[in-house]
Image (tube, rainbow, N blue to C red):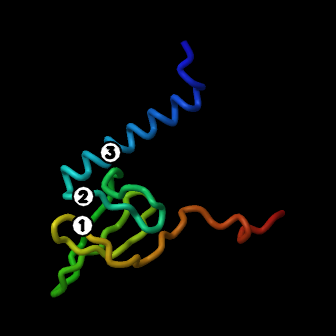
Amino acid sequence: MIFGTTQQRIDKVIARARARIECLCEKAYGGWTKCPWCRQIMHAYEGTTADDISETPFSILRCGNCKGTSIWQWGLGWHFVRPADRPIPDTPNPSDVKQT
């Protein structure tokens, strides 16, 4: 019996895990929200926050993975409006670091 290569099995496990995360996020949050900056599901990471913008129907979501922000509207689930502030990297850009 041939079950495929190890990489194929790993890819299948990853695909199943992503599908499960999307299903859980859909049940818990009325849909799943992909960060426009890192393309990950925001609610799958701790530290994801939603702040309401006063007097508007929009919310600012901060990704728990990359810390980038985007503007969303809550309706029948989350609806993407536009990206906001890009994430600020924790480490300096290697080209900015002076070589000694």
Q: Residues under labels 2 and 1: Cα distance? A: 6 Å
Could you say which disc has been placed on residue 21 in the image? 3
Tag 2–tag 1 contact (CB < 8 Å):
yes
Task: Estimate how packed mark 1 is, as few (under 14), some (14 to 19) or many (20 or more) residues with alpha carbons within 10 Å.
Answer: some
Residue occupying the far right of the picture: 100
User: Badge 2 is on which residue?
Assistant: 31
Decide which of tag 1 and tag 3 comes sooner along the chain: 3
Q: Amino acid at mark 2?
A: Gly
Task: Estimate how packed mark 2 is, as few (under 14), some (14 to 19) or many (20 or more) residues with alpha carbons within 10 Å.
Answer: some
Q: Amino acid at mark 1?
A: Trp
Q: Residues under labels 1 and 3: Cα distance? A: 16 Å
* Residue 47 position within the rendered picture, expressed as x and y whole percent measured from the top left: 33, 57
- SS type, badge 3: helix
- SS type, badge 1: strand
Q: Residue at x 55, y 31 (%)?
A: 8
Q: Amino acid at mark 3?
A: Ile
Tag 1–tag 3 contact (CB < 8 Å):
no
Could you say which disc has been placed on residue 65 in the image? none
Side of 9 relative to 95 (left or right): left
Could you say which disc has been placed on residue 78 in the image? 1
Decide which of tag 2 and tag 1 comes sooner along the chain: 2
